[in-house]
Amino acid sequence: MLKDRRILLGITGGIAAYKAAELSRRLVEAGAEVQVVMTRAACAFISPMTLQAVSGRAVRSELMDPEAEAGMGHIELARWPDAVLVAPASAHFLARVAHGLADDLLTTLCLATDKPMFLAPAMNRLMWTNPATQSNVSRLRERGIRLLGPGVGAQACGETGVGRMLGPLELIQGLAGTLTGDHVLEGNRVLVTAGPTREPLDPVRFMTNRSSGKMGFAVAQAAAAMGAQVTLVSGPVALDTPANVERIDVETAAEMQAAVVPRAGDAHIFIATAAVSDYRPLVAGDRKIKKSADRLQLELVRNPDILAEVAALPSGPFCVGFAAETHDLEAYARAKLTAKGLDMIAANAVGNGLAFDRDQNTLHLFWPGGDEILPTAAKTELASVLMRRVAERFHAQN
Ligand code: C5P
């Protein structure tokens, strides 16, 4: 999988450093040449001798090391790899790289290399969700540095949550995906909407729908796995943010529009999977509606059509819509493709327990001049096939 690829494996100080030995061994088994660079803190968790044995190369850890510098100096070392993988990447290390510090060999190499960089964070869940870490992560992503994970699960500190380092095989797959050219959306910005919207009636009640957000989150994940820089604008859902995806949470259609439209001009591809409420209550008073008469009439007004607005932008992104219908699926889907001026539409049947809040789905894709049925599959798989078709048609047009 990684035959003759040169991987600079950075190891920083965290308990997950013990997994780096297995990772290094697996990288070698996958055909890679591995040069390990450890921070001082990493050496407190695992011995450089172990890493030397499994990688087959002397481990580097000091910047001011005359002997090592006489062999392969740090600038040469920064030029040597095809990719840099830092696993585990501690919160402190993410902060140092985000701020461009070069106070040891590994951070200096990160600053001096122009090769693809992959960081596998590993830390306590509160350290990961801390706004300081999240702001560092956003900075790193903006610079095109890829984060592999972290995953969710039991942590060495006894807690459970997000912050666990991905396993060696997952890390190698993530790395190989990019290096072997599977990244057909590398360099492209993809904007995705997902989930339902909530339209308030009063301070305690709202109108919404059954959308779970699963399809949109799977689409965002698939686009990120294909190398795209992904922004996911999501209504209220109970889902974890996929790795390498920037997420913006909104509630109402108006908030979704305000988050999407200013970003759409910059996006290459826009995928609207959100089940946006077509109407909202005309008045959403600041006092709770009290029960009185037997009948209560609500007046609703149309919400903005976010997808149609983005599709109408001059030199706007490649636009993909979704059409969820209980009947006449094909006719409605084709009509929406034309009416909203879309490049593609993915139609799915809803009602009778289909699609909404399910893990499986079936899609019928339409584009000007063609169509294709994507048979029933897990939403995650379906999203990968859909994103491949989107990438093909997008590249054919650009
Ligand atoms: O017209 P309809 O609501 O059926 O169109 C569905 C498509 O339009 C979906 O892709 C949905 O995300 C998008 N949409 C939107 N804003 C709306 C309504 C729908 O972006 N207000």
Image (cartoon, helix red, strand yellow):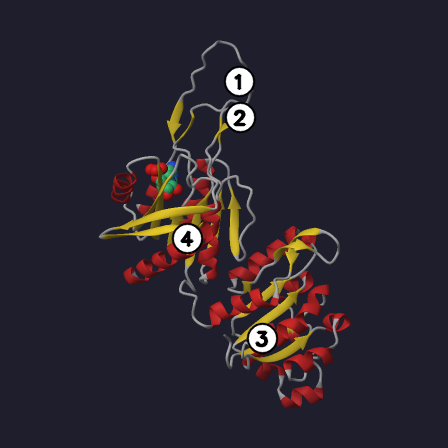
First along the sequence among labels 1 and 3: 3
x then y, percent, for residue 145: 54, 65
Residue 146: % across, % down: 54, 64
Which numbered disc covers residue 382?
A: 4
- Mark 4 vs mark 2: which is more N-terminal? 2
Residue neighbourhood size for the residue with mark 2, other residues' Cα within 10 Å, grouped as few (<14), some (14–19), many (≥20): few
Q: Earlier in the sequence, mark 3 or mark 4?
A: 3
C-alpha span from label 1 to label 3 = 63 Å
- Seen from this angle, which residue lies furthest right? 44
Query: Amino acid type of disc 3?
Result: Leu
Give the residue at x 64% y 80%.
55
Residue 280 has which mark? Answer: none
**Residue 308's x, y, as percent?**
33, 42
Element assignment for label 1: loop
The reply to whether residue 306 is visible in this rendering is: no
- Between 49 and 12, the residue placed more toward the observer is 49
- Report the Cα–Cα distance between label 4 and label 2: 34 Å
* Label 1 close to label 2 by CB (< 8 Å): yes
Q: CA distance from mark 3 to mark 2?
A: 54 Å
Q: Residue beneath label 1, please? A: 289
Q: Is 398 above or below relative to 213?
A: below
Identify the amino acid type marked 2.
Answer: Arg
